[in-house]
Amino acid sequence: MIWVKRTAFALVGTIVLAVVLLYVASEWVLRQTHATLVEPIVADRSPAGLVEGGRLARIVGCRGCHSPDGTGRVLADGLMIGRIAAPALARRVADYSDMDLVRLIRHGVKRDGTALHVMPTQALTHLSDDDVARIMGWVRTLRPSPNDVAGTVSYGPLARLLVLTGALDSKVQPIDLAPPRRPTGTGRYFAHVSCLACHDLHQAKPEEGAPATIIPALAEVGAAYDPKAFHTLLRTGVGMTPRDLGLMSRVAKGDLKMLTDDEIAAIQAYLVREQNHPSTQ
């Protein structure tokens, strides 16, 4: 019986040590700070800018994660993952300057210099200066609500393991990839600022935090659909078969429906070109 107790104590000690090491190592990653050069962009508060800012906030997913009215949303809450909540926007930006917001949206760096790990800055970094200004202007119109969700993030052991392995990686984007103004060729632009939040352009990849789910290459998807079916996909989330497309269905119904018919057609035309003649970008 003594050896059984010793084995049990050794096993418990090993588990405790592993948990401590996991916490210390992941906390070191999470607390790293990042310096970025931030573009001087001022929020666009013009009537037209506010309307377009609200539309863009849907297309690029701000209102998908933070809720349509910006009151916030709990994205995950469990023992292993922890609690990850997209905060109420009005309360979060109340003490953020425009420069702080640019750093957050386009570069994935919070005001204290630490990195975001749950935000699609790989797509948002492509937002033009004028569109960032429009989104910031819309965000500035929001007011605190009794329904606001506290934006607390507390990582559980599985989430911390994902952080350490890179499966839940830093969203820091140190390089400015955005043009000053939205390009007239909107296909490439909207594909990058919206679709690249989940997809890679030319490679299939596992879904972040759910490696068993494979997200197809974006150009391949665009080329596989005829124009009518692609339009239906982005409007309704229904693909060429009746199966549930999961996150894609939810995003299409909630966010991508704000794209115009011309923008949807331009996105597919760009994706078909990329599939047939891949660029380096």
Image: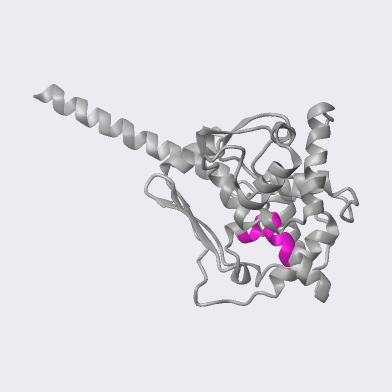
Classified by dominant secondary structure, the portion drawn in magenta counts as helix
Say above or below: 281 vs 265.
Answer: above
Report the front residue among 185 and 147. 185
Residue 176, position as x, y percentages in the image: 82, 47
How many numbered discs?
0
Occupied quadrant, residue 222: top right
The span shown in magenta is 54-63
Report the front residue among 15 and 261. 261
Please report the residue visible at 82 percent of the width from the left and 52 percent of the height from the top.
262
Whether residue 34 is visible, yes or no, is: no
Quadrant of the frame with the C terminus: top right
Q: In this view, does 266 lie to the left or right of 220?
A: right
Say above or below: 22 vs 96.
Answer: above
Please report the residue visible at 65 percent of the width from the left and 59 percent of the height from the top.
62
Say above or below: 159 vs 42.
Answer: above
**Residue 242 lies in the magenta stretch:** no
Please report the residue visible at 55 percent of the width from the left and 64 percent of the height from the top.
72
Residue 259, position as x, y percentages in the image: 74, 56
Q: In this view, does 2 lie to the left or right of 34?
A: left
Q: Is residue 171 left or right of residue 180?
A: left
Report the front residue among 29 and 240. 240
**Residue 56 lies in the magenta stretch:** yes
